[in-house]
Amino acid sequence: MNPDTIYALASGRPPAAIAIIRVSGPRAHAVALALSGAVPPARTAELRTLRHPTSGEILDEAIVLRFDAPASATGEDVVEIQCHGGRAVIDALLAALATLEGVRQANPGEFTRRAFENGRIDLTEAEGLADLLEAETDSQRKAALALAEGGLRRQIEEWNARILELSAAAERAIDYDDEDESLDAGLLSAAGDLASELEQWLARPRIERLKDGILVVVAGPPNSGKSSLINKIVGEERAIVSDLPGTTRDHIEVAVAIAGMPVRLTDTAGLRQTDDRIEAIGVERARRLVEAADVLVWLGDPAEAPDHRRVVLVQAKADLPHRGTAPAGVTPVSAVTGEGTSELLQRVQMLAHALLPDEGAIVLNRRQADHLAKARLSLAAAAQADDVPIFAEELRQARVAFDRLTGRAGVENVLDALFSRFFLGK
């Protein structure tokens, strides 16, 4: 248990109807006693008059809740004060807490870090909680919630249980089969099956695209209507529109959500040969973005469209009389009337969907995938082992990789970076 008792405002920025002040640590109950004169029973909300512990001045009337270790959010004794949400009330209560011995203001993320250190959550759940706090789209929220609620932790526990069964069988073979160290074919097959299962998990879409957004690049020759289309989709003037060719010299990226899916919609310089050095730099950047695009929206001649796996061909300026009927497979779009924009976004969504995880699925981040890959390599090596000791050692290495994944070992270098993502009071 940490010797310090910490406190912080756990609700949003005042003013508000109600504010929540959280206290955690060995002196949490003493804090409640000093402020309210009595500590309510565990997990019972009671209305208390809060007074300054030194002067006795009435500070507020508030709901006080008590949680006893280890059955609390942090695994420590916890008190939560639900007070009125005015700035003066909050400031007065925080100032009163600061006068108490052995009590200090929490650092950002310290409550969650204590929950991790006290075994209330593992590292994957803490990462999911950090993602949940940062979620901006419904897809991000669902993926983060699957982690925060322990989905990956439970899956790893199931994998670990299977590895422990194999390890126990290997240890029995080492102890009792002194004259024959050959491996049972069933053990090798079971290790190989588990390695294949991990490989399937590693082949799933990762969370980085869900967090950073799908890169949708709008490209084409100058004056093809790229900037106008971007502005129409976004609903405001984000890109400069002009009849002069070469207006867009650098790319413009706008974060939008399409059907709850995060997208980085990117306007680019018109693709053409130019003697203008500044425009030429923009054109070269546009070519690189076309290559890097997850989905390419092409507004030029379909026959001149870049070779891309996921491309949407668009006939822009469809409202002009001379445009005629769009060829098969080409979506007519008008930034003036809005014609075709819904169909365009539907096609982008269909192409981008395969790059994102299924709704509510457990999604790995880069750190988690790296450790899962190490576990898979060890299990694959175990499946090819030619004697029992090597088999047992590879299984041990797989368990070490899982321990690093969940935070049971060797994660000190990632903790500070992770919990710095949390705000004060969480």
Image: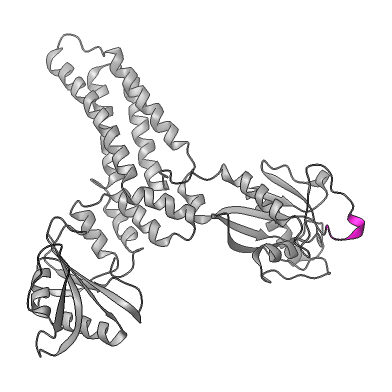
Q: Position of residue 113 (x, y in %)?
A: 25, 59
Q: Which residues are magenta?
A: 318-323
Which quadrant holds residue 217?
A: bottom right
Query: Observer-nearest residue: 10 or 208?
Result: 10
Q: Position of residue 198 (x, y in %)?
A: 39, 32
- Quarter of the figure that contains the C terminus: bottom left
* Magenta stretch encompasses residue 321: yes
Which quadrant holds residue 404?
A: top left
Please say if 155 is above or below 243.
above
Residue closest to the far top: 179
Please say if 62 is above or below 393.
below
* Relative side of 406 to 103, left or right: right
Q: Position of residue 382 (x, y in %)?
A: 31, 23
Query: Observer-nearest residue: 1 or 135?
Result: 135
At 75% across and 65% down in the image, what residue appears? 228
At 70% across and 60% down in the image, what residue appears? 268
Whether residue 401 can be seen here: no
Whether residue 118 can be seen here: yes
- Quarter of the figure that contains the N terminus: bottom left
Q: How is the image coloured?
A: one colour
Query: Observer-nearest residue: 101 or 285?
Result: 101
* Relative side of 157 to 66, left or right: right
